[in-house]
Amino acid sequence: MIKIDRFEQGLKDSQTTISLFTCDVTGWEIYDGQTYLEVEGKVIQDSFITLMEAVGAVRKTAGEE
């Protein structure tokens, strides 16, 4: 018999999960198993846009000023 009850299988209850880090740019919580970036000692969520914001990069389009 297949058991589909997630608590019976030993999976973590998402309501009791504790965040391990907080993103220094967005303030979002980073949980066990999630990837994150460390830039100049800052913890940053693994997102290209957040990384750009963290390093002060500005996206521009050539010909538009």
Image (cartoon, rainbow, N blue to C red):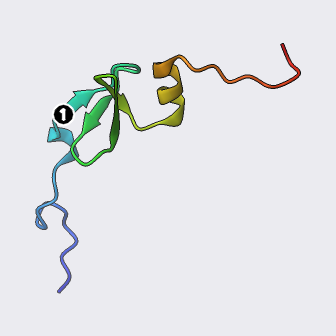
Indicate the secondary structure of the residue bearing disc 1: strand
Using a 10 Å C-alpha cutoff, classify the residue at mark 1 as few (fewer than 14 neighbours), some (14 to 19) or many (20 or more): few
**Where in the figure is residue 4, as x and y percent of width and height?**
22, 71
Which quadrant holds the C terminus?
A: top right
**Is 9 on the left-hand or right-hand side of 52?**
left
Q: Residue furthest bottom?
A: 1
**Is 13 on the left-hand or right-hand side of 48?**
left
From the viewer's side, name the closer residue of 47 and 65. 65
From the viewer's side, name the closer residue of 45 and 58. 58
- Look at the picture and state if 27 lies above or below 17: above
**Is 62 on the left-hand or right-hand side of 25?**
right
Residue marked by disc 1: 20
Which quadrant holds the N terminus?
A: bottom left
Q: Residue furthest right?
A: 63
- Look at the picture and state if 60 lies above or below 19: above
**Where in the figure is residue 49, as x and y percent of width and height?**
54, 30
Q: Residue furthest top?
A: 65
Q: Residue at x 25, y 49 (%)?
A: 33
Which three-letter amino acid code belongs to the residue tagged 1? Leu
Q: Residue at x 33, y 19 (%)?
A: 24
Q: Residue at x 86, y 18 (%)?
A: 64
Residue 34 lies in quadrant: top left
**Where in the figure is residue 54, as x and y percent of width and height?**
45, 20
